[in-house]
Image (cartoon, rainbow, N blue to C red):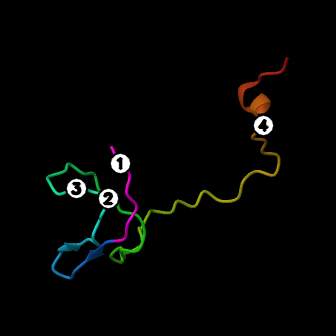
């Protein structure tokens, strides 16, 4: 198995253009393509999540583990 790092071009119609790879002999190969980088992702609308207003937190609220579980040893 060989690892080749190269830059490829994807045309607007989806074809892939690869540069010549002289270190490979002619023939059929099985390959895995991992794409990193440049392609732009389509813009998405931001999520509209519900907001529940429960008012201000109590002034004496403690979120320490010992206080939540009454774990005082």
| Gap between marks 3 and 1 measured at Cα | 12 Å
Instruction: Determine crowd level at label 1: few under 14, some 14-19, many 20+ residues with C-alpha closer than 10 A.
Output: few
- Tell me if label 4 and label 3 are in contact, CB under 8 Å: no
Which residue ends up furthest to the right in the rendered image? Answer: 73
| Gap between marks 1 and 2 measured at Cα | 10 Å
Q: Name the residue beneath numbered marker 3.
A: 25
- Tell me if label 1 and label 2 are in contact, CB under 8 Å: yes
Disc assigned to residue 64:
4
Q: In terms of image quadrants, where is residue 63?
A: top right
| Gap between marks 3 and 2 measured at Cα | 7 Å
Q: Which residue lies at the image location 40% right of the left edge and 74% below the top edge? A: 38
Instruction: Determine crowd level at label 2: few under 14, some 14-19, many 20+ residues with C-alpha closer than 10 A.
Output: few
| Gap between marks 4 and 2 measured at Cα | 61 Å
Q: Secondary structure at mark 1?
A: loop
- Tell me if label 3 and label 1 are in contact, CB under 8 Å: no
Instruction: Determine crowd level at label 4: few under 14, some 14-19, many 20+ residues with C-alpha closer than 10 A.
Output: few
Residue 6 in the image: x percent, y percent? 37, 66
- Tell me if label 1 and label 4 are in contact, CB under 8 Å: no
Whether 36 is among the magenta residues is no
């Amino acid at each position: 198995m060989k690892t080749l790092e190269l830059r490829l071009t994807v045309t607007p119609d989806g074809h892939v253009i690869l540069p010549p790879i002289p270190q490979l002999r002619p023939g059929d190969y099985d390959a895995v393509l991992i794409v990193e980088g440049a392609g732009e992702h389509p813009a998405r609308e931001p999520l509209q999540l519900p907001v529940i207003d429960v008012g201000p937190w109590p002034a004496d609220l403690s979120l320490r583990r010992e206080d939540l579980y009454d774990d005082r040893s």
